[in-house]
Image (cartoon, rainbow, N blue to C red):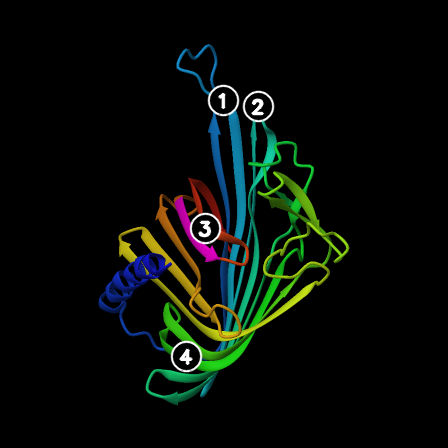
Amino acid sequence: MRKLLVIGALIFGMSFTYAQDADAEETPKQGWTKGGTFTFLINQSAFSNWVAGGQNNISGTAGINYDFNYLRGEWSWDNKVIASYGLTNNDDQGTRKTDDRFEYNSLVGKEAFGNWNYSFFLNFRTQFTDGYDYDNDADGDFRTSGLFKPAYLTFVPGLEWKKNENLKFNLAPATSKMTFISDDLYIYDDDIDDFVAHSGPSNINALQAYGIDPGDTFRYELGFYASGYYKFTAMENVTIENTLNMYSNYLEDPQNVDFDYTLNAILKINEYLSTNFTLQLVYDDNAVTALQLREVFGLGVNFGF
């Protein structure tokens, strides 16, 4: 786990240093500032009589990244909505989900001193459709996630350091985090080599799901939360966006730090086309005791709004 934190800190720190050197001071704009991007990524492979082998496949991912921020005197209110959904289809496996995410971030700040603000932060995360563990369930008979299965709500007062809209971080030593499950899920049990329902306590084989005990639908945590965001231009037509979130639960295993780092790199071709690369690293031992990795690369069609 310490290695993951070191890797994330190095990536975050190198980009942070570059951003400080590269970004010029900006004059904050009073009132509302709104803007976002809709992106559609597509990947496709086709084979016919190809002796080296291969599977015909096509995949697409649609995503929205939208900001609406307000500034008035000493007060600021920053909001970001991130949503994405992707599907892939190949000859052997049919159609499967490749991406599914909805996230809303909101932070109210009031000037304190220098670049520091008093802050109140809220984060909500879930997904749109059901997910399945295809490694253990090739037919997709057992739902392991879905809409509000789980959902995460995090909120806290804290301190925010903000140089500009593209470079900021937030520290919150007393963060409330709530995890919800709205319906039954199935969890793979290695001991019996099968799935068991995360249901009532009468099921003796039932396991925890996302840290929630069998028979429950809610989990509360209190801990330390740190987050950072920065976006900069690495070179002409190349934009790098970084997001880092870390959380430690005081009430249970505080040494197990949840870690979520996302890098988005966009190489602009013209007004509407770009090459997009996304890398996400997640560690959350309540979900799975292993590093989660998601990588998406493809040609993007972009529309600003």
Asked whether residue 1 is drawn in magenta, I would say no
Q: Nearer the viewer, residue 211 or 299?
A: 211
Q: Is residue 135 above or below residue 113?
A: above
For the point 39% across and 52% down, which residue is it?
264
Circle nearer the N terminus (3, 2): 2
Circle nearer the N terminus (4, 3): 4
User: Marks 1/2: CA distance?
Assistant: 8 Å
User: Which element carries disc 1, helix, strand or loop?
Assistant: loop
User: Which element carries disc 4, helix, strand or loop?
Assistant: strand
For the point 34% across and 59% down, which residue is it?
8
Percent position (x, y) of residue 238? 31, 51
Q: Which residue is mark 3?
A: 290
Q: Which residue is mark 4?
A: 160
Circle nearer the N terminus (4, 1): 1
User: Marks 4/2: CA distance?
Assistant: 49 Å
Circle nearer the N terminus (4, 2): 2
Q: Which residue is mark 1?
A: 55
Circle nearer the N terminus (1, 2): 1
Percent position (x, y) of residue 193? 61, 38
Q: Amino acid at mark 1?
A: Gln
State if disc 3 and disc 4 touch (CB < 8 Å).
no
Q: Nearer the viewer, residue 15 or 187?
A: 187
Label 4 packing within 10 angstroms: few (<14), some (14-19), many (20+): many
Q: Which residue is mark 2?
A: 92
Q: Which residues are magenta?
A: 276-284
User: Marks 3/2: CA distance?
Assistant: 28 Å
Q: Nearer the viewer, mark 4 or mark 3?
A: 3
Q: Amino acid at mark 3?
A: Ala
For the point 36% across and 73% down, which residue is it?
164
Q: Nearer the viewer, residue 133 or 256?
A: 256
Q: Amino acid at mark 4?
A: Glu
Label 3 packing within 10 angstroms: few (<14), some (14-19), many (20+): few
